[in-house]
Image (tube, rainbow, N blue to C red):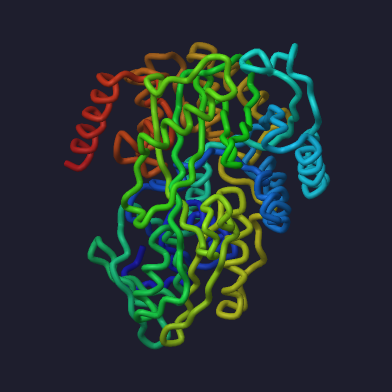
Amino acid sequence: MEHDEIYDVLVVGAGINGAGIARDAALRDLRVLLVERGDVAGETSSASTKLIHGGLRYLEHNALALVHESLAERERMLHLAAHLVTPLRFVIPRVETMRPGWQIRAALWLYDYLGGGSSLPGSGARRLENAPEGQALKNPDGGFFYYDLATHDARLTLANVTGAVEAGADFLPRTAYLRASTRDGIWQVDLSDGRTVSARALVNAAGTGAAQLRTALMGGCADIRLRFVQGSHIVVPKLYAGDHAFLLQQPDRRVVFVIPWEQRYSLIGTTEVPLADAADAGVTDAEIYYLCDAVTRFMAKPLDPHEIVWRYAGVRALVDDGNADASAVSREYRLLEDSVGMAPLISVYGGKLTTYRMLAERVVDLLVPHFPGMGECRTRETPLPGADEMPPGGLEELAARLCIDHPRLPLDWLTALVHRHGTRAHRVVGGAQRESDLGRHFGAGLYAREVRWMVCHEWAVTADDILWRRTHCGLDMDDAQRAFFAEWLAKQAGEDSV
């Protein structure tokens, strides 16, 4: 990174949108700098419900275009992020007093229609009384099912950052944007590391800070309002046997998901609570009781808050459409083009994990007039790092090959490695042939060898970066193990800096 270099595009924010934009632009041969004040996916992009989905409930709000686009992107992700997505069957217990059966059938038919040509199975109806899916329910009766994709949101974001860097972008994590001005049509951006960098175009993908950043850049002009909506989730020991999820209807007409997660757990969410300030985010007691009640309403075994092993909250920055109901506020994104001293500025508002790639494509398309020689969009067909060179048999074949090549290494670790790193797993393993080659075992299948890979190649710095974002090993570690790992990691960082 040369100090006198002029970048084509500087992207502020390495959440899913900023990461996707940086990768798209770099793949079109633009010179890109991505800056992030914290960790990759350090905020909302690692605090989602961890789904790539069309958004079945959005049909009630007539968001047909959003659902159609989301379903098209869902299909693409099966190829582009094959190691990070898994087909997931959702079961909807029928509750006639909430939504009559005909209404759900119609919605599912429309969902299938809008996702026409999907590789996933279609929806249908199912009796639950004697079915495996009904065993955990309090009053199993009729029900419905449909399919979406589960994902690892933080690693999806990380794969985009990795892809951007491999395509030639520069990335500065833990480096905050401070201020910017323009000179002769070029942005001059001051960063927290003391550098001032130049860029021909600036993309504001700052998430919850996007409106504030645009206001500062435009000299106080604020013609768009964001609404901050907190979504909280809880994680409990797995509530039922089987690999299906539940969509549970609630009396307030919201829905709550119960999703099998990390083999031994159930992920439950989400809430939708308006916030005045994104900095106020945090799971509240009221949200915990809401989610526990939502599950207890359907499950034979009541869910007690004391069973919770982890909780997290993310803040969605949604464009304020004037709707009083937070659940009904549109999830569609909005892109604003501005010019400051002849230097282009694009600001990104709203959006959802599923549509990040399409959003990124449209953002970079807006830059074509400023860079007429840029290439065509390549993200529609180019797999993310880890999904490239996937064998015909997919992850199963990839895992089998890895196990054959390394028969003395722990099978569970190799399998987890494939799901985290995809086709890059063999690089993490390197020349290791036996468990002792993996270095210290911290618990929960986390070895020093993979930790060093995450530090050297995935910009990990803190224990949270590794235990709760790049992996979820923190779930299966006790307090003492987590504390020891944090101390060990800090010590390693200190030794490496000497």
At 44% across and 64% down in the image, what residue appears?
11
**Nearest the eye: 446 or 204:** 204
Q: Quadrant of residue 246?
A: top right
Q: Quadrant of residue 358?
A: bottom right
**Nearest the eye: 383 or 358:** 358
Relative to 191, residue 116 above or below: above
Point out the image quarter for the C terminus.
Answer: top left
Q: Is residue 173 visible?
A: yes
Q: Give how far across and how far down residue 243 sits, in percent.
A: 63, 21
In this view, which residue lies farthest toward the front? 97
At 51% across and 31% down in the image, what residue appears?
268
Q: Give how far across and how far down residue 467 sits, in percent.
A: 37, 31
Left or right: 108 as drawn, with respect to 489: right
Q: Give how far across and how far down residue 171 sits, in percent.
A: 40, 56
At 68% across and 40% down in the image, what residue appears?
78
Q: Is residue 167 visible?
A: no
Q: Give how far across and how far down residue 470 sits, in percent.
A: 43, 36
At 81% across and 31% down in the image, what residue appears?
124
How many callouts does the rendering have?
0
Q: Quadrant of residue 299?
A: top right
In this view, which residue lies farthest toward the left? 498
Left or right: 196 as drawn, with respect to 247: left
Point out the image quarter for the N terminus.
Answer: bottom left
